[in-house]
Image: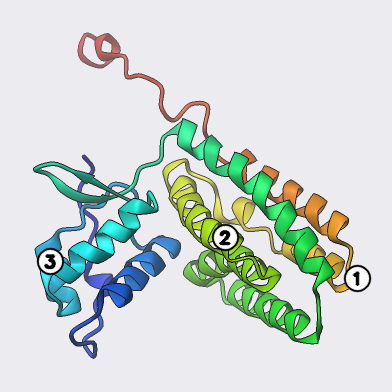
Amino acid sequence: MPKTSALPLLKDPQSADSTSDEIYERIYLAILEHRLTPGTKLAEERLASIFKASRARVREALSKLAYEQIVEVFPKKGWFVARPSVEQARDVFEARRLIEPAVMRRLAQNMDVEKKTALHEHLEKEMDARKVDDKRAIIRLSGEFHNLAAALAGNSSFTRSLRELSTLTCLVILLYNAPIVASCRADEHERIVEALDRGDGETAAQVMLEHLDHIEGALKLDSTEEEADLEEIFLR
């Protein structure tokens, strides 16, 4: 198991008696921003101290994350940020290719001024983050764009599924070495919003599929999990 990454980044000195939902959200955000990496151990006692909460509350939050496959639990070892396999990574993108075009079509049919404003405000935040090269914000906002679109489309099942899939995508990007620039192409988000502004769900769906292809294409899924050649390692 990989060495534990530092967890103090989650600490908020002003927080007190965090609820399990708050703990869940803080861990979720840390993963989304790539502050918590795949394989990081999430020690209950440490997290309880950080969040000023009982271990029972921490365990409740971790259990919810485990249900969403974002966290893994191993008997006698504890909780760890998930390390998606190559097969799981491909499954994530297969699921997103089914769900997100449907989100685009549904959203295009229900666009209004309020929804357009929300999407354009989000794009502005993405552009601002890029201007100052705030990598954490770029990653977080890129993932949140997809979650926002699902929420605006008005289907709670889409929203719930994409939230989980977006987080797993972040772990996959971290684990399989996708460059941030390649995996977070702002121009494609802009093209999607332009199509939605016109009520053109088919174009928005097509651009979304291209976007997902580019993200997956930037991953090193063919070579990462090659079996180690022990003879090569120890006998040469």
Check contact, mark 2 vs mark 1: CB within 8 A. no
Q: Circle 1 sits in a helix, a strand or a loop, which is it? A: loop
The earlier-in-sequence mark between 2 and 1 is 2
Residue in the image at 56% along x and 71% along y: 133
Depth check, mark 3 against mark 2: the one in front is 2
Would you identify the image quadrant in which residue 162 lies?
A: bottom right
Please state which amino acid type lies under the numbered disc 1: Arg
The earlier-in-sequence mark between 1 and 3 is 3
Quick one: quadrant of the N terminus? Answer: top left
Which residue, given by chain and number where applicable, does mark 3 sit on? 46
Alpha carbon separation for disc pair 3 and 2? 33 Å
Residue in the image at 59% along x and 44% along y: 95
Q: Circle 2 sits in a helix, a strand or a loop, which is it? A: helix
Image position of 173 with respect to 58: above or below = above
Which residue, given by chain and number where applicable, does mark 1 sit on? 198
Image coordinates of residue 160 in percent, x first then y, are: 52, 62
